[in-house]
Image (spheres, helix red, strand yellow):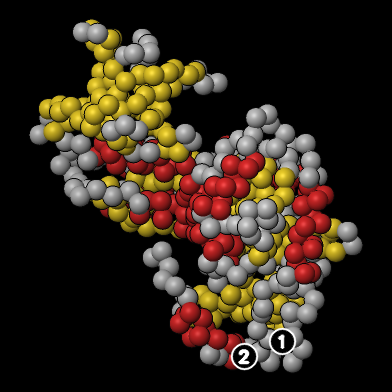
Amino acid sequence: MENKNISRTPVVAILGHVDHGKTTILDNIRSAHVQEKEVGGITQKISVFTIPVAGKQITFIDTPGHEAFDLMRLRGGSVADIVLLIVAADDGLQPQTLESIEIIKNSSAKPIVVINKIDLPDVDIEKIKRDLANRGILVEGMGGQVPVALVSGKTGQGIHDLLDMILLVSEVEGMQFREDLKDGLLGKAIALETVKDKSKGIITTLVLQQGEMKPGDWIGFRVDKEIGVEKVKGIISEENQNIPMLTAGTGGRVLGLSSPINPGDSVYVMTERSPKVLDGIWKLEEEEQSEGISAADLSALFANAETKVKSLNVIIKSSSEGSLEAIKKSIDKIKDDEAKIEIVDSGIGDITPSDIERASVTKSIILGFEVSMESAASKLSRDRKVLVRTYDIIYKLVEELGDAFNLLTMPQETEEEIGHAEVRALFTLSDGALVIGCRVKDGIIKRGCKVYVVRGDEIKGEGRIASLRQQKDTINEAKKEQECGVILDAKIDVAEGDTLYCYKIIK
């Protein structure tokens, strides 16, 4: 059979830390304004764009940068021929940068380092290159062969050079090898995301790795442990334009499926409506596949939990399988020896009366991400006194659930000091919130705990730590000698040199 690797569009995944400018760079390439449309200014879904460049094509996979989306980033990197590691010149290597480096190390995709925001003053490009070398990414000029592009997603500086570099790497170093298609198959794709749209139904975003796919073709994919076979009713771009055909290396959104396709699963284009051609393929894939990863009003949230209960039951509804997976993984990281968060049920689509009924029986709260609540469900939630919280930004959901969990693990009897910190600087955010820059002098400072602000021998006020951060990352606690930023839930007269004494409630 003809080898399908001879001519295809290179697939480029964009990885990096949140707010380092991945989507802004892609906006500049496409002359689009995707980032402006993102809720909270961050990417929360995988998107695929195939773009004409100098008479050729490049397919870009835009991946979320927030830590909750690490599985989606991993998936984007696994299907790519080239990976762009975006690093902000003014921020350097951050947690998701380091995670993206590990993805690159474990992938056969060719990396290109893209240092963004070079238009900003006083940036140290050489330091970023040294830091990358210390992490095993040896760039050109530092003893390695990894190309480096210097760009500004805001002004467009260096973008044309970056595109030329992508085409050069794909031509000189080649693309990832794909096995020949089995007889009876016209193409193979990888699903990256599945969304349930109110008007269009189930939409699956995918990248075609081999062959072709067009409306009217039969496709086969897994539905639980069975094989689902359906006809492609339509293929559209991210801009909702009809795509007449996908060729190897291009991507799009498949419309009208009756069953969702799990992100990461293979999708096969078949010559006829017969699952027999797929015999043996699923078994081989299962052997190779790694094991899957199986509210602002906190007082209201805890009104549903008895003080002796050491578990918090939740039902999760999300707009897509990918974000649902990310939420589950984030919740899995919230742990304590004395309590747990139990996911009673989960799914994609709006919150329904049956969700409310299940929450009432299991004494659960319902968390919704990018979904609405049916009118009948809204009335039923009030009648059954079921707490429902919906979010448009995933890290808000995770943060508030973490706060709720922290409160759940704190017995409310007496106070015990667990640490204190010195106030070293004060900053006011655009929304008026006061950030207290501290250095922990002893013990720990923990999010959700009570603090007293002390000046000399005088207590200036008390409040709870509503937010605790190190640089841009939300943390649960800061330890001795660590620096952190604290936002309290009460307005207190705080000055440099004050001491924050942190307390927890114990029996």
| Residue holding disc 2 | 277
The local secondary structure at tag 1 comes to loop
Q: Quadrant of the N terminus?
A: bottom right
Q: Are marks 2 and 1 in contact (CB under 8 Å)?
A: yes
| Residue holding disc 1 | 271
Q: Earlier in the sequence, mark 2 or mark 1?
A: 1
Please identify the residue farthest to the right as the structure is shown: 55
Instruction: Look at label 2 and name its amino acid.
Output: Val
User: Residue placed at 81% from the left, 57% from the top?
Assistant: 164
User: Residue placed at 31% from the left, 31% from the top?
Assistant: 481
Horizontal arrangement in the rendering, residue 334 relative to residue 432 (left or right): left
- 10 Å neighbourhood of mark 2: few (<14), some, or many (≥20)? some
Residue 462 placement: quadrant: top left
- 10 Å neighbourhood of mark 1: few (<14), some, or many (≥20)? some
- Horizontal and vertical percent position of residue 285: 51, 81
Instruction: Look at label 1 and name its amino acid.
Output: Thr
- Horizontal and vertical percent position of residue 117: 68, 38
Q: Nearer the viewer, residue 64 or 84?
A: 84
Q: Quadrant of the C terminus?
A: top left
- Horizontal and vertical percent position of residue 442: 24, 29
The disc placed on residue 504 is: none
Is residue 252 in view from this perspective? Answer: no
Horizontal arrangement in the rendering, residue 59 relative to residue 53 (left or right): left
User: Residue placed at 75% from the left, 64% from the top?
Assistant: 169
Q: Nearer the viewer, residue 416 or 201?
A: 416
